Image: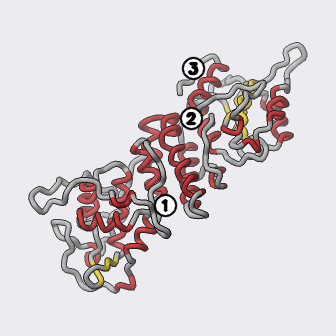
Amino acid sequence: MPHRTPSSPASRRTARPSTTITVAAADPDPVSAAVTGDGGPAAVPDTPYGAALTTGAVARRLGVAPTTLRSWDRRYGIGPVHHEGAKHRRWTPADIAVLETMCRLTAAGVPPAEAARTARSAAVAPSGPPGAVAAAPAEAPTGPDAPPDGPADGPARRPARPGNWGALPLGRVRPECRGLARAAVRLDSGAVDALLGEVLAAHGLVTAWDEVMMPALRAVGRKWETSGERYVEVEHLLSWHISSALRRVPARPVPPQPGPPVVVACAPGELHTLPLEALTAGLAERGVPVRMFGAAVPADALDEAVRRAGPAAVVLWSQSRATAGRALVRRVGGMTWGVRGARTRATVMAAGPGWAGAPVEGAVQPTSLGEALRMLGALYGRDLPG
């Protein structure tokens, strides 16, 4: 599986903490959250500017460009109640809550105009605790006062200046991947979790991994590699929640007599575990017994694990050539166990970009998560579809 994950330490994360997007309702304070029926600011008492944030500060908090916030204000009325002087916007906590709703909805693929109507409706909802799920989007207003449709974040696609958290370099990807990346840049854990749950439920593990999770991880990895230490927190958060989502993939019950398991481990010195977590989730989802040993398994410990487990296959993951020890493959492939006259050995699978180049003697080398699952399924005499 030549999936290349970012080389940040976050990629070694293992799992911890709804499969539907929750929309945080705005602060119910009627002073700061009031808007008129057409989306414009209503007359409200003065609010101290010391309790509000500038557009730049809000943009950094949400991971969007300041031009996007100004465009949303101009086009859709998603702006602050208060302005300092003629131009300077000052965003209160209630204003920011509306923006967070807007960000979550657009990340989920809701058109900006529709997302703005829902965000404004949540802000003026007469009842309901903060964090309540918004109802279906309000009917679109008609007439000359209706906000124009069309992308509100066009100016945000310009290269980010220092101090701004710009879009990740995704290229041509699924909309779900773009939404996931935006939520990760905003450090919006709730949206990241919800999007991951939705894509797994809708498309299955292999598609979710190949077309949503991995492109987002690669993009954030490229971003922090070219931005100094910036974006490392984004990759830590995204890796954590992907690991959590993989652990939540439902496992099929293993038969009472399951046969030998699949042993899954990182090569000695290798710290990147997310691809193996995806493989482990795929095997468990299909009812294949699996033993996952995680990051940087020493050679002697791997020997002991193989001898004790008596596996049908041993999967060794290597992210870089520095950890792809071909001698280890020969060593594991040469191990036998069982009674004399009926000795057996495991199939060795060399997975990951570290093994790229010349074929690895004595090992099979899958090129994707789906292919790895099919190869391992063949050892059990049944198909494990990707």
Residue 103 in picture, x, y percent from top left: 36, 59
The residue sitting at 30% across, 56% down in the picture is 134
- Disc 2 marks which amino acid? Ala
Q: Residue furthest top?
A: 341
Of residues 263 and 234, the one nearer the viewer is: 234
Of the pair 259 and 216, the residue shown nearer to us: 216
Q: Label 2: which residue?
A: 251
Residue bearing mark 3 = 383
Q: Residue at x 80, y 22 (%)?
A: 345
In which quarter of the view is residue 303 placed? top right
| Distance from the alpha carbon under mark 3 to that under mark 2 | 17 Å
Q: Is residue 181 left or right of residue 373?
A: left
The CA span between labels 1 and 2 is 29 Å
Please name whichever residue, 39 or 160, is drawn nearer the observer in this view of the structure.
160
Compared with 127, 285 (above or below) is: above
Query: For the point 62% across and 34% down, which residue is it?
Result: 1
Identify the residue at horizontal 41%, vertical 45% (top origin).
176
Disc 1 from disc 3: Cα separation: 39 Å
Name the secondary structure under disc 3: loop
Residue bearing mark 1: 187
First of labels 1, 2 by sequence position = 1
- The amino acid type, in three-letter code, at marker 1 is Leu
Front-most of 92 and 9? 9
Q: Which quarter of the figure has residue 97?
A: bottom left
